Amino acid sequence: MKQFLKAAGLAVVLAGAAATGVLAQSPPAESLLADVFQDHAVLQRDRPIAVWGRAAPDAQLAVTLAGTTVAARADAEGRWRAVLPALPAGGPHELSVAQDGRAQVLTDLLIGDVWLCSGQSNMEFGVRSATNADTEIGNSADPSLRLLLVGRSSRPSPTNRMGPGSVWRVSGPESVRDFSASCFFMGKQLRRSQNVPVGLIAASWGGSVIEDWLSEPALRRIGGYDVPLAALAVYARSPEEGRRVWDETSNRWWRDNDPGSAGSTPWYSPAYDDADWSTAAPEGFWEGSSPELTTFDGLVWHRTAVTLTAAQAAGGATLRLGPVDDVDTTWVNGRKIGGGEGWDTPRTYSVPAGVLHEGRNIIAVGVLDTGGGGGLWGPAADKTLALANGSVVSLAEPWRRRVSAPISGLRNLPRTPWVGGSGVTTLSNGMIAPLDGYGLAGVAWYQGESNVGDPEGYRRLLSGLIADWRTRFGDGQLPFLVVQLANFGPPASTPTDSAWAALREVQREVVEADANAGLAVAIDIGDRYDIHPTNKQEVGRRLALSARAVAYDDAPVPASPSPRTAEVAGPTVVVRFDRVGDGLVVFGAARPVGFELCGAEGCRFVDARVQGETVVLDAAGVVEPRSVRFCWADSPVCNLYGDAGLPAVPFELPLTR
């Protein structure tokens, strides 16, 4: 079964969006302090404390915390910054800022460890949706655990203002309910192990791509994003001009990449003969409608015809398609009348007067699905053509449909750069920029599902994100924890290529190459039928274990066994593991499963046996073995663990001799 990435996330995304609307309002614009500084906040312990905000231009300010006062001066634009001495864990304290008889005082501040949690829907996933939610929420009160849920905010340029509802709150049933479950459970574990106040900042956006979380300078250093960044800069100055520029870019992409848009008679042309196309109801994701589309991501064209009278065709019209997953280009009688993106965004397009005519009219929609469910998936009843004479024509009858190109051959997908979640830098600008410079103990990152189509591109982006955020938060060694993607999707009975496995491998390799990064392996706590598994308690526990190893240097801390070497030894291959504790453990069988050897004739499952810290594979019958893979599938069956009950990390390693 195809991964219904966005469909499964709809409830989570809507819940998160609704949650930000019911919290208290953000700090007022006249505050001397930046939005992130509020009552009940946690400030990072054991390092100088940076504080900043806005005041009158050139104003002198006095900033006081825990009995120490420092002076600051605002610049010509009113921006000011002060650095207070480091403090040990404790509190509560007051923070005051005074300027010419005007003052702002914050109360109930704690000094402790601050963690930023970010990513897409599995990090956004609220406690109220987690396993055993009622009990967890009921037992959530902790005056030394503080939560800041950053309101959703997508901006074309950086801002220092946080989105609505971005308020520091003391942990308890009301504040925890809609807070990130993975982040909250990590924080609870760290409160127990470190015995200091903990502040958690959750800034996530369901369905978001990693490109939207990087800053503009970081994306330019990575390379390959000059075109969308240039369009975004134009949009920031003039939305109308930005849309025109991007429309040209998008049209060019379709012409260059889509076979249906090329040739003398493109598939949207009224002259094109679609008689041999298949038919399909214009609702539901296409994965469930046809065997050829069960696992398909890429380009598919849809066409339908409506017959109009002269009275109906006179004047303009409004075309309603409902949501389209993910990107569309929409044409009526050979003229483009719209295009958009956002898997859950309904499409409504104006059809100018003169486009429709008496008789047969052709509506054609090219759909690009970048992952998860695809197609004109909303209810068929919502698809209509509303005409100028007041009549409404239903488009609920079956449409014709034809596959154009798989996503594997497509590059530089045409994601509108200013659309929150699928653009470039907009979430960085709106949700991370207001936090820039705030003292952190570390970052927890759970994202990647929306980037599975390009694992190698993700390698550069994840490394770039880590470097970018370390620079922005003023700590070149800032601990960075990554949740490796959980199992999700159909199980495999034979060795197969898997973009999910490939992205997990990128996550593993990026973390392994970074002494200040940690990996939380989740390959055994996912759900093959649901991209949002509810056991977030275990995700949080594993993040906390990783934090203890990377950020706190606690020893010994249980960890997932990780491969060190894979060596050919006669008719066998020996894989040596690190971080196994007292030895590797197999659950549910006498031997581990999920090992493959890949050689001149492809990959094949092989028998394996555990010997202490090694796994010995039977290489008999494998021609020219070159690499070993473990748990390499969207949703593999894995039964190899360390002695502490943490699963071995999925991997691919070249063989040495």
Image (cartoon, rainbow, N blue to C red):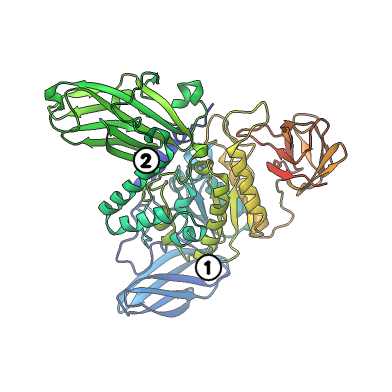
Residue 474 numbered mark, or none:
1
Residue 560 numbered mark, or none:
none
How much space separates mark 2 and mark 1, taking CA atoms? 35 Å
Q: Is residue 110 left or right of residue 13?
A: right
Q: Is residue 68 above or below residue 477?
A: below
Is residue 542 in sight in this rendering?
no
Q: Position of residue 184 (x, y in %)?
A: 53, 48
Q: Are marks 2 and 1 in contact (CB under 8 Å)?
A: no
**Residue matched to label 2:** 341
Residue sitting at 42 percent across and 40 percent down? 13
Q: Quadrant of residue 338?
A: top left
Front in this rendered view, residue 394 or 54: 394
Front in this rendered view, residue 504 or 528: 504
Q: Quadrant of the N terminus?
A: top right
**Tag 1, which secondary structure?**
loop
Residue sitting at 49 percent across and 57 percent down? 223
Q: Neighbour class for label 1 at 10 Å: few (<14), some, many (≥20)?
A: some
Is residue 112 in sight in this rendering?
yes
Front in this rendered view, residue 11 or 28: 11
Q: Quadrant of residue 476?
A: bottom right
Kind of residue sitting beneath label 2: Glu
**Tag 2, which secondary structure?**
strand
Q: Is residue 43 above or below residue 518?
A: below
Earlier sequence position, callout 2 versus callout 1 = 2
